[in-house]
Amino acid sequence: MALGTAPQTVTTQANYIPEVWGEELRAFREINLVAAQVVKRYPFEGSVGDTLHIPDLGRLTVITVSEGGDDANSVNTEGEFNGVITRHRGIRFQVPDRVGMQSKYDLRAAYTASAGKSLAEDLDAHILALESGFQGNQRYEGDGTTVTAPATGVDITDVGLRLLLELLDVANVPFDDRFLIAHPRQKNILLGINRFVEYQSIGQGNMPIRTGLLGEIYGVPVYFTTNTASIASNNDANLLGQRDAILLAMQMDVRVQMDYILQNWSWLVATDYLGQAFEFRDNHAISVLTTQL
């Protein structure tokens, strides 16, 4: 016996078929935040004014003391470091009552958390964008050679990394608080360097867990983030340096303000920060260009 020629279908019965909404929102993937935690932070929060003045302290001259002579004193005419804070960044959004009440999700809370993460990523990108100014505006390749125009990045090599570390050593850059911030495209390259793999095998002991920190090579902690600057559309600007290379002055850390707007029947939420990063010691960091190909 033949079946009917007009069966019920999902199209004809669409009004009876419910839609299923997930219990959680699918948030954007966060970028590893690494730069703000490895640079020098200046205690400026809550202070008035817009300009930092940090006096220089020069090295006094050593003289040969003459026997019984009235020798000249060592005198320095010192300079100072100046930094003007002009960077005020923020995100503002509005959630009407109708949207808030009829939505399955707490949109105000979700977007507030999202805004905070976005501002933190913005600050990290701002810090890493300073890479071009170090070593007298001279970038280096991953193999330790200087970059010539047009820029053609080279993957980090064992020899190249040692040459770059030598630049820091010769400049009397402290061994403590050094760092390498690299794009994840260099992760596979570094895993091919024995010194890095040996460290991974030995283990990190009591080293605290930090976002983006994978391991250490030649005593330098290695962090990975996609927030590194992109140069000439096909190169990543990784940063090898020491804490004093960059000064981060946060006059106001990330804050959240909320207000109910009667005339709009809605909540207005604003998140912002006021702060700026400056190149503090030119020879304490090196921009290392590597290829994106």
Image: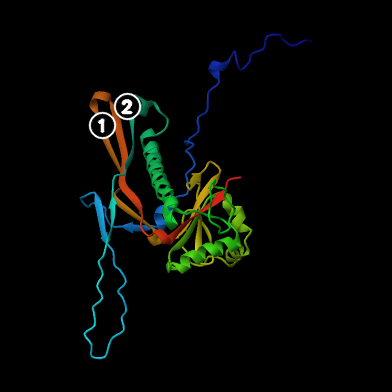
- Residue reaching furthest top? 5
Residue type of the residue flagged with mark 1: Tyr
Q: Is residue 242 visible?
A: no
Residue type of the residue flagged with mark 2: Asp
Rounded to the nearest angstrom, the CA distance separating label 2 from label 1 is: 10 Å
Give coordinates of residue 13: x percent, y percent.
58, 15
Q: Is residue 218 visible?
A: yes
First in sequence, mark 2 or 1: give its number. 2
Please tell me which residue is depicted at 32% across the width and 79% down the height of the picture: 62
Q: Residues within 10 Å of mark 2 (few under 14, many from 20)?
A: some
Instruction: Looking at the picture, tell me which residue is in the foreground, 279 or 249.
Output: 279
Instruction: Looking at the picture, tell me which residue is in the foreground, 182 or 270.
Output: 182
Quarter of the image where one finds residue 156: bottom right
Label 2 residue SS = helix
Q: Is residue 259 left or right of residue 27?
A: left
Pointers 2 and 1 in contact (C-beta within 8 Å): no
Give coordinates of residue 141: x percent, y percent.
55, 54
Please tell me which residue is depicted at 38% across the width and 26% down the height of the picture: 102
Please tell me which residue is depicted at 59% across the width and 13% down the height of the picture: 12
Give coordinates of residue 78: x percent, y percent.
26, 65
Give coordinates of residue 293: x percent, y percent.
61, 45
User: Which disc, if any, is residue 260?
Assistant: 1
Label 1 residue SS = strand
Considering the image in quadrants, where does the N terminus appear?
top right
Residue 136 versus residue 95 in the image, above or below: below
Instruction: Looking at the picture, tell me which residue is in the foreground, 292 or 23.
Output: 292
Q: Is residue 11 left or right of residue 116?
A: right
Instruction: Looking at the picture, tell me which residue is in the foreground, 203 or 182.
Output: 182
Please tell me which residue is depicted at 61% across the width and 58% down the height of the picture: 191
Residue 200 versus residue 48 in the image, above or below: below
Q: Which residue is mark 2?
A: 97
